[in-house]
Amino acid sequence: PVVAESRVALVLVDSALALAWYWVVLRVAGRTERFLQTAAAIFGFQTVLQPAFVSVTWLFLRYMKDPVWQAPVSLLLLVLAIWMLAINTRILRSATGWGQFVCVAVVLLQSLLGRLVETSLFPEVATPVP
């Protein structure tokens, strides 16, 4: 579990990394004028869906070893993750004009990079839940 003092720092690092990532992506696409709109869309949809994602993740961790609830909760988490990926991809596609496949790859790469940075700066994030 993340220590209380690390939570604020984790959110700040994650937000700064997302802002930097989308700035670079839009710069590569030659669409830096769309940065504010893209950032607002990304942070807006994540703010709306974060409570659901946190709740479903908690359910997943809680029922991960329960034979009855493991499959339904895993499916719910998968559906929510795919939905979030689709929304993020659509926002990026509108901002850059790139194809769907490229945008999916960019979003997944950003997620992977974010996770790597988080676990290197905050090792307690990578600690498995007992």
Image (cartoon, rainbow, N blue to C red):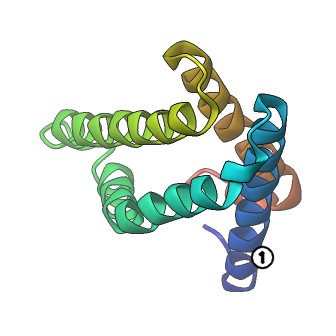
Residue occupying image coordinates x 27% and y 50%: 63
Q: Residue furthest left?
A: 68
Q: Which sits in the foreground, 96 or 129?
A: 96
Residue furthest to the front in view is 33
Q: Quadrant of residue 110?
A: top right
In the picture of the structure, the residue carrying the numbered disc 1 is 9
Name the foreground residue: 76 vs 34.
34
Give the image location of residue 33, x and y in percent: 73, 51
Question: Image point 39% across, 53% down: which residue?
Answer: 61
From the viewer's side, name the closer residue of 99 and 130: 99
**Residue 126, visible in the rendered structure:** no
**In the figure, is residue 103 to the left or right of 89?**
right
Q: Give the class, few, some or many, for how many residues have Cα within 10 Å of label 1's Cα (few <14, many ≥20).
A: some
Q: Is residue 96 above or below residue 40?
A: above
Left or right of 123, for residue 7: left
- Is residue 69 toward the left or the right of residue 80 in the image? left
User: What percent of the width, then of the height, locates residue 34?
Assistant: 66, 50
Taking 82 as reference, is 32 above or below it? Answer: below
| 69 with respect to 18 (left or right) | left
Residue 45, position in %: x, y? 42, 59
Instruction: For the N terminus, give its image quadrant.
Output: bottom right
Q: Residue 32 at x, y = what percent?
A: 78, 47
- Write down the quadrant of residue 75 in the picture: top left
The amino acid beneath tag 1 is Ala
State the image quarter where residue 72 is shown: top left
Q: Is residue 82 visible?
A: yes
Classify mark 1: helix, strand or loop.
helix
Q: At 58% from the left edge and 58% from the top edge, which residue is drawn?
A: 37
Residue 100 drawn above or below residue 116: above
Residue placed furthest toward the bottom = 5
